[in-house]
Image (spheres, coloured by chain):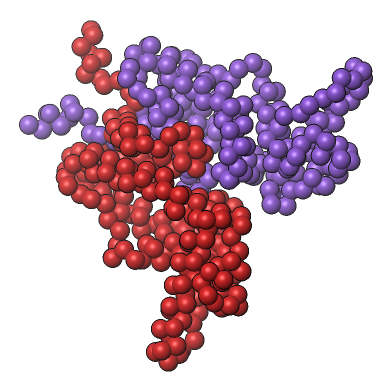
Chain colours: A red, B purple
């Protein structure tokens, strides 16, 4: 998202340090004051840089916040991957329980809520989000489901996009709409319901005849 | 949400007409200009009333829009109910296909997007939404699932809140995040996947041994 001029190594290093300080400041600040009251001025003051330094690299506070999330995700080494112990149900429960814990942490809740709602009204940001942040994560989720298909745990004819939405959609909605508690029990319940389906098993129905 | 003084019948009727004109204007206008550019001034001009008339009844444009949705839902007679032909899969597909059609209609997309995103940042509006708009609808969804449980179509031990999220959550997310096409085929696919689950049926797995 940024265009940099060629510079001496020292200047490059100082730029990179400023950039990281700004992104860290944006992330911390939005968690404290909320997105509505987040301002470029506030980020600049907290990062110890001038406002113009920020405007040189980013057009808006939404763009700064987006890059802050990108920095966080790049901090993790390599491509994202879900745990694969061979037991899909256990792996998905572990992942959803850790997501639930993150969403209950005020340090993450507000920045992620801000990013998610910006996306809803800004198709350009939504496209950048889909490509650079959500895309690699979604691919990791689908890869874990593919592995379970190969192991014979999942149906071979699943639409994997729908399958991913089935596991992660309910949690995202409940969080965004604050429509219910986010608990470890809830995380487990989603995984079990998504895997087993709502329908009463055919076998038990046959037993009745 | 409004407090009315006692008034002669004619004045009451005129008030009610103004109120309905304002709500209809808000709904139409947000569909045309988007929520960010929706203003009390604009609503007043379109409804042919003074700005003060609106401020007398509503504190904000979000509150006007909320009541506009309430008026729409009250326009339907009695409590909301889902179709119940005895075939849950067919009924859910019909409901989700009609939701998909509504979300693809620009007249509804923008107002509903606006309401949904206001809710994400306004816990008071979220509570009003949960109680007066989403609540009765959610109860209708659960009632349809309960009926299917009584008919032996669904598992008896389902968490009905999770079950509702499993059917409607993926669609809401895909719409809000613009993460994929909203088609009749997609509506059907959600219903089938939610009902049958992701897991490969046990019977087929047993056949392999």
Furthest residue in direction left, as rendered: B209
Q: Is residue A42 left or right of residue B68?
A: left
Q: Position of residue B71 (x, y in %)?
A: 71, 28
Q: Is residue A61 left or right of residue B164?
A: right
Furthest residue in direction top, as rendered: A209
Residue at 48 percent of width and 61 percent of height = A28
Is residue B101 something one can see in this rendering?
A: no
Q: Position of residue B18 (x, y in %)?
A: 85, 31
Q: Position of residue B58 (x, y in %)?
A: 76, 36
Is residue A187 something one can see in this rendering?
A: yes
Above or below: residue A137 compared with residue B116 = below
Residue at 37 percent of width and 24 percent of height = B159
Q: Quadrant of the C terminus of chain B?
A: top left
Q: Quadrant of the N terminus of chain B?
A: top right
Q: How many marks?
A: 0
Residue at 62 percent of width and 37 percent of height = B125
Q: Quadrant of residue B196?
A: top left
Q: Quadrant of residue A158?
A: top left
Above or below: residue B175 compared with residue A80 = above
Above or below: residue B113 compared with residue A24 = above
Q: Is residue B124 left or right of residue A180?
A: right
Q: Is residue B145 left or right of residue B80?
A: left
Q: Quadrant of residue A73?
A: bottom left
Above or below: residue A60 compared with residue B73 = below
Residue at 65 percent of width and 26 percent of height = B73
Q: Position of residue A140 (x, y in %)?
A: 30, 54
Q: Nearer the viewer, residue A4 or A25?
A: A25
């Amino acid at each position: 998202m940024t265009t940099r001029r060629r510079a001496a190594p020292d200047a490059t290093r100082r730029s990179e340090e400023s950039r990281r300080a700004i992104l860290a400041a944006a992330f911390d600040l939005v968690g404290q004051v909320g997105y509505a009251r987040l301002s470029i001025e506030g980020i600049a003051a907290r990062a110890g840089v001038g406002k113009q330094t920020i405007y040189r690299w980013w057009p808006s506070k939404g763009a700064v916040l987006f890059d802050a999330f990108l920095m966080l995700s790049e901090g993790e080494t390599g491509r994202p991957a879900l745990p694969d112990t061979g037991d899909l149900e256990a792996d998905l429960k572990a992942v959803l329980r850790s997501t639930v814990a993150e969403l209950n942490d005020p340090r993450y809740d507000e920045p992620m809520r801000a990013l998610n709602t910006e996306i809803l009204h800004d198709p350009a940001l939504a496209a950048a989000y889909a490509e650079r942040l959500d895309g690699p994560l979604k691919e990791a989720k689908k890869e874990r489901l593919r592995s379970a298909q190969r192991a014979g745990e999942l149906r071979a004819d699943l639409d994997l996009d729908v399958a991913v939405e089935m596991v992660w959609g309910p949690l995202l909605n409940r969080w965004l709409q604050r429509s219910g508690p986010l608990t470890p029990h809830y995380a487990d319940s989603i995984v079990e319901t998504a895997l087993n389906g709502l329908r009463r098993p055919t076998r038990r129905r046959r037993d009745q005849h």
